[in-house]
Image (tube, rainbow, N blue to C red):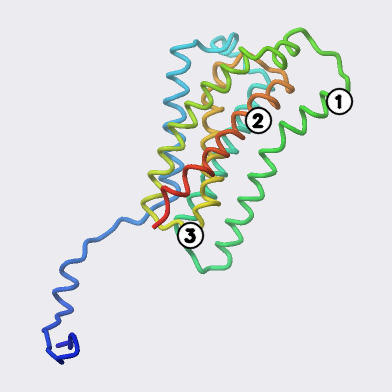
């Protein structure tokens, strides 16, 4: 087969076989692999934090307080659903059902992210008796800084890994992916710190953990989109 080039009408041989020979196979991105990677990194960071700061009191003895389990599960679920929604954007699909799944996942993320802030507001305005620990948790910035620092550093590492994974695909909405990546990193990062955190106050969780996740989400929106454009 020949094709013409330029105005002079010159021809040059063109071989489909040669074109195919230059192609290299590309492994498809699998969402489950990306989520497994994020969970494994979260576990690694959590263990590292525990070695550095120590495990929360009672946990080593097998005392799993309800609020601790609920907090950790909620943060992991937030991270997992957010990561799934973000990674879905790296696999463009025409299928209407797939688009519905992506939209539903995004709505679930918003609902989950609002659970602890809403509970904190209810507890705060209900004027329930507050212990001295709760007062310290709310007003002592040193305790809050520790939560923000370790959750934020963990989120930075996890968010970077998720961003690298997303770059393997073709993200169709970088801005939306930025928000979701930040939320995923914030949820996983806060969950990694949760294994150490000694505070069980709902007001504390609704204040500092929510702030850590929100900061990660904003950082994701500001930084990630520019790294995903193609």
Where is residue 54 drawn, in percent x and y?
50, 10
Where is residue 20 drawn, in percent x and y?
19, 72
Which residue: 88% across, 24% down?
Answer: 126
Of 126 and 84, the residue lying toward us? 126
Q: Furthest-front residue in view?
A: 7
User: In what element is the residue under mark 1?
Assistant: helix
Q: Is residue 143 left or right of residue 227?
A: right
Q: Which residue is mark 1?
A: 125
Q: Quadrant of the N terminus?
A: bottom left
Mark 1 or mark 2: name the one nearer the start of the chain. Answer: 1
Of 138 and 86, the residue lying toward us? 138
Separation (CA) of disc 1 from disc 2 = 18 Å
Density class for disc 1 (Cα within 10 Å; few <14, some 14-19, many ≥20) is few
Q: Which residue is mark 3?
A: 172
Density class for disc 2 (Cα within 10 Å; few <14, some 14-19, many ≥20) is many
Residue 142 appears anywhere in the view: yes
Where is residue 28 drawn, in percent x and y?
35, 56
**Label 3–label 2 contact, CB within 8 A:** no
**Quadrant housing residue 197:** top right
Of 85 and 223, the residue lying toward us? 223
Which residue: 11% across, 84% down?
Answer: 13
Q: Is residue 112 left or right of residue 51?
A: right
User: In what element is the residue under mark 3?
Assistant: loop
Q: Which residue is mark 2?
A: 210
Q: Is residue 207 left or right of residue 50?
A: right
Mark 3 or mark 2: name the one nearer the start of the chain. Answer: 3
The circle on residue 182 is none
Density class for disc 3 (Cα within 10 Å; few <14, some 14-19, many ≥20) is some
């Amino acid at each position: 087969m020949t094709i013409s080039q330029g105005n002079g009408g010159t021809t040059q041989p063109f071989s489909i076989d040669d074109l195919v020979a230059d192609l290299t196979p590309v492994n498809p991105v699998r969402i489950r692999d990306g989520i497994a990677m994020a969970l494994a990194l979260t576990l690694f960071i959590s263990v590292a934090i525990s070695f550095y700061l120590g495990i929360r009191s009672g946990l080593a003895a097998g005392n799993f307080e309800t609020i601790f389990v609920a907090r950790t599960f909620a943060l992991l679920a937030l991270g997992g659903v957010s990561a799934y929604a973000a990674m879905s954007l790296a696999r463009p699909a025409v299928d209407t059902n797939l688009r519905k799944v992506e939209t539903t996942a995004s709505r679930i993320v918003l609902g989950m992210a609002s659970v602890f802030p809403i509970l904190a507001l209810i507890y705060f305005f209900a004027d329930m008796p507050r212990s001295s620990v709760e007062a310290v948790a709310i007003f002592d910035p040193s305790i809050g800084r520790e939560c923000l620092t370790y959750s934020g550093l963990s989120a930075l590492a996890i968010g970077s890994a998720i961003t690298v994974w997303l770059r393997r695909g073709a993200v169709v909405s970088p801005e939306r992916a930025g928000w979701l990546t930040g939320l995923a990193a914030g949820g996983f990062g806060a969950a990694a710190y949760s294994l150490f955190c000694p505070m069980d106050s709902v007001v504390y969780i609704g204040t500092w953990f929510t702030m850590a996740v929100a900061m990660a989400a904003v950082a994701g929106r500001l930084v990630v989109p520019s790294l995903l454009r193609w």
